[in-house]
Structures are given as structure tokens and as C-alpha cells.
Amino acid sequence: MRNPLAYEFAALCLLAWTAFISAGEDSTRFGYYGNPDNIEPKPYEWGERAEWRTCAVGREQSPINIETNDTTLMITDIFGLDTSYVPANGSLFIDSANILEVELNGGGRFKIEDKTYYLQQFHFHSPSEHTIDGVRFPLEMHLVHTPESGELAVIGIPFSFGEENSFLATFWDELSLLSQDPDASVSLTKVDVREPNVHLGPAYARYMGSLTTPPCSERVTWTVILGEANTVSQKQMWTYSNRLPYSNARPIQKLNDRKVKRSVTVLNLR
């Protein structure tokens, strides 16, 4: 059973994290490239604000390009990621930076070694923020988890073009109901990110990074799914682009002296 004090702490962490990326009167708003009507600070300008200085000077920034041949193999979680997700109700909305998000009312947990993180929300970037061996994907989903103590953990899931995605199909048509009103939202029931709805394998990379939005806080544990197990159809991307026509992906950041680890799966050991 979840410790109620841990739950309250996780909720406070989520509120603090949401405050960083939610709408604000002035200093909390930011933008991306491509939209000629957007006057908010673009990624190369984020670090010019004192409260966002980490975006410019941080040494563990995200996203990165993951070179699979330049990774260190790790033998933990050889049977896959240790997740225990559950269907949860949620709220679908578009935030002030034009990021499509689903906030969940309890979604289960994710463990890395002896540390437990709780799923709070997921959101989308198009094109993908992370690249794998230089390849950029049409869509990337971020599963955001808060811990009982310490920093966040995020799972990045790239989607390649292919068959219609049945998980996205459960709420994708609701995008047309989201108007330009920043307070517009759609209630969702039984949002289920478990397998086989969302594939968290067969392999993944892990590194220490940051939020990909201001204030670009570091010490975020990133797990990025490798391969093309998750697909999105051309029609589904058209539906997305019809409502969100401009990029909301931060440019690739320098790896600096960080090491990227890559999972060793059971298939690798046979």
C-alpha cells in the first residue's frame, strides 16, 4: 500500500514541477521555433533569464542524441523495466507552451533499483526531442514520475510512422475538442499505459539529464526506449498537427562528460 505521506510529497513535487511549465503572466511562459506569431522566449533565449540560467550553463541538459554504439551496457533490469502501472482517470489539455498533456489521478509506479517513482502525467513532443543514432522520430511521449524524495524520473518513448496506435486512438480524437482557450480540457477515463498499449522495450538507454523545458532543472533520471516498437499512423499525426502545427521540441544538447547506459535484455544473454 502506498504510504500516504509519500503520496502527499509526490503531489507537492508534481505541483512544483507543473508550476515550471504551466501558464504564467510573464516569466513562466516560453516558446519554440517555427511559430511566427509566438513572441515568447525561444530555446536559445531560455538561459538569458536568471531563473532559467541552467538552460544555458547546465552540464547535464536534455534532450541528447543517443549513439547506441557509444553506450555502456548495464545488467540491471534484464527482464525489462520494473513498472507497475494501473488504469487511471485523467485530464487532457494543451498547456501554455502548446504541449499536449494528460494529467493522471494515480497511474502506478516505476522502480529503478531500490527507488520508487510514481506516474503523475505524460505529454508529447513533435518531432521527438531525443534522437537515436541521429534519427529523429515524428512523436515522443514522456512519462513523468515523481519520487518519494529526490529528483524526477522520465521515460521517453519515441513513435515511428507505421500502423495506427491503438493507445493513442483512445483519446486522440479529443484533440479537436481542445480550443485555443488555455483552460480547455477533456476528462478521460481508465487511461492505461501498460503493455501492450505502450511498449517499454525491448531495449532502453539511461542517462542523467534535465527537464527539457524551463527552468531545465538537472538530476533527472532519463530512460529512453530504443527501437521502433511504438508506431503512429500518418492520419494520427495529421490529427495532431492540425491542432498543434508547430514544433515543440528542444534542440539536442551536448553530452559533455556524461555516460549513457544501455540495457542488456534476456535476448542478449542467450
Image (cartoon, helix red, strand yellow):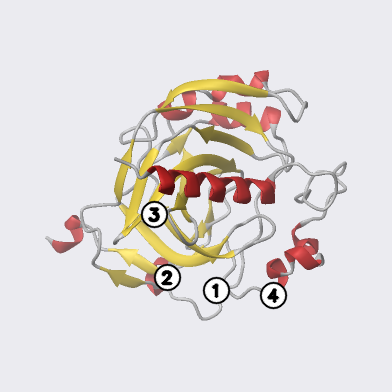
3 vs 1, front mark? 1
127 displayed left or right of 132: right
- Determine which of the numbered discs, if any, sits on residue 192 in the image: none
CA–CA distance in space, label 3 to label 2: 13 Å
CA–CA distance in space, label 3 to label 1: 18 Å
CA–CA distance in space, label 4 to label 2: 20 Å
CA–CA distance in space, label 1 to label 4: 13 Å
Q: Are marks 2 and 1 in contact (CB under 8 Å)?
A: yes
Neighbor class of circle 3 (other Cα within 10 Å; few <14, some 14-19, many 20+) is many
Name which of mark 3 and mark 4 comes first in the sequence. Answer: 4
Of residues 139 and 151, the one nearer the viewer is 151
Give percent across and percent down for residue 266. 17, 56
Name which of mark 4 and mark 2 comes first in the sequence. Answer: 4
Quarter of the image that includes the C terminus: bottom left
Task: Give the residue furthest to the front.
Answer: 5
Residue type highlighted by circle 1:
Leu
Give percent across and percent down for residue 139. 55, 42
Name which of mark 3 and mark 1 comes first in the sequence. Answer: 3
- Determine which of the numbered discs, if any, sits on residue 57 in the image: 4
- Determine which of the numbered discs, if any, sits on residue 226 in the image: 3
Residue at numbered disc 1: 255
Residue type highlighted by circle 4:
Val
